[in-house]
Amino acid sequence: MNLSLFSEFSPTNKAVWKQQVIKDLKGKDFNKTLVWQTTEGIEMQPYYTAEDLTDTRLGELYSIQKKTLGWLNIPVVLFENEALTNTKTLTLLQQGADAIHLDLSQVDIHKIEFTKLLNGIKLSQTPVYFQTNSQDIALINALQKVVPYQMKGGCVNDGLGRWMQTGKWQTDHFTDLSTLLLRSQSAPLFRTVCVSSHSFHNAGANAVQELAFTLASAVTYIDKLTDLEIPVDVALQKVYFSISVGTHYFMEIAKLRALRYLWEKVEAQFRVADPLTFPPSTFSAFIHAQTSTFYDAALSPHTNMIRATTEAMSAVIGGCDALSVHSYDASFQPSDEFSERIARNISIVLKEEAHLDKVADPAAGSYYIESLTLQLIDAAWALFLEVEAKGGLIPAFEQNFIQDQIETNYEQQLNELKDGKRIMVGVNQFQETTSVLFAQTLQPINNSPFKLLRNARISENFER
């Protein structure tokens, strides 16, 4: 029997729904009551339908999103000595880690015995991302002596991001980077050009600013490398993005989806020049996401567990390839085994219990998220072009254009918290009164002729 359960209901559309809402508001203004604007300048509607998805770019947006299932769970390991670090790394890999971010920034690479450090770890199977504080040439020399096969992982060294935070520039950074890239060319999954958004995000950038400035940073890297006669396809193959993911749940999902589209748009410019070398989506963006430290609360530290969970969900639903969840207390004190385990298990729970690794693109088709993604794309691209018109990332930064944009947004976010227009639990409401020891974020002394980006926690304003 063919029974239509909805035959008694007449067809409707968004205009009819809006008229009914206006009637129910009894004289209140629809836009002032139900429509609100984000710090990115994007108007948020109370209700989205298929009528909001008429943009002809939707098919392209879907086609370039991540197609593979799951993501790499990448905890951070701080080097102590070869034996202890090796033991901890092997334990983490047995406890759910898929890859490792190995922080070697506080040690002289030449003094490390890599055969002991990597004992039992095969880099062709387990990706390791090495943070070396500009010692990447020494790293690749050491690795190629003990690793006779193709490696996976990469180098965590965003020289541009560090310059924007400290004002200190390593004069041979791009030369070293080109050497590193060529030396590792036989290992295509060992990514050496790290483009991060952390310096922008942690200074208070909104999603549009973060996307635009990160894209400008990536273009700067490619331009500088090709100036050093690195083939464009070789440079693009080695790029990966490391993105901070904040607490604005749907906005952060849309941010990662928008990044994939925008990077494809940049690559398209190279394909125009050489379509044979660059077939569509040859170098799809590899996105490493990490939970934000900008929104961490020190006086109510356990609330950071909830923030980290929603941030991690945004990252995986948005399509990250790899994810690092920092401990709930890591931004203001040394973490212990408990806080590190909780952080690591967030990613595991999202896989094993929420099953978010069973769908390649869970956000596809959402009226709200897709509409938001397209608006982010347009706004970020416009700001990116504005940066390029000023000569690119470096000249724009030296003119304080980037810093002023981010500072304005930071002040807006702070004022919203102070005025109670936005709530952060444990920060501007429901703050714990128990005294907790923590370190205030220290900023470098600025001897540069331009402003620097602060590495901030916005909750510090409420913890003094």
Image (cartoon, grey):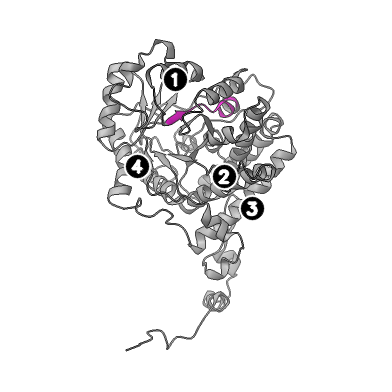
Proximity of marks 2 and 4: CB atoms separated by less than 8 Å: no
Residue under label 3, please give it: 378
Residue under label 2, please give it: 206
Real-space Cα separation, disc 1 to disc 4, in angstroms: 27 Å
Real-space Cα separation, disc 2 to disc 3, in angstroms: 14 Å
Proximity of marks 1 and 4: CB atoms separated by less than 8 Å: no
Dot 3: few (<14), some (14–19), or many (≥20) neighbours within 10 Å? some
Q: Is residue 123 magenta?
A: no
The amino acid type of the residue labelled 1 equals: Ser
Residue under label 1, please give it: 105
Dot 2: few (<14), some (14–19), or many (≥20) neighbours within 10 Å? many
The mark nearer the N terminus, 1 or 4, is: 1
Indicate which disc residue 305 carries: 4
SS label for mark 2: loop
SS label for mark 3: helix
Real-space Cα separation, disc 1 to disc 3, in angstroms: 38 Å
- x and y percentages locating residue 392 in the rendered image: 69, 35
What is the magenta range? 153-163
Indicate which disc residue 81 carries: none
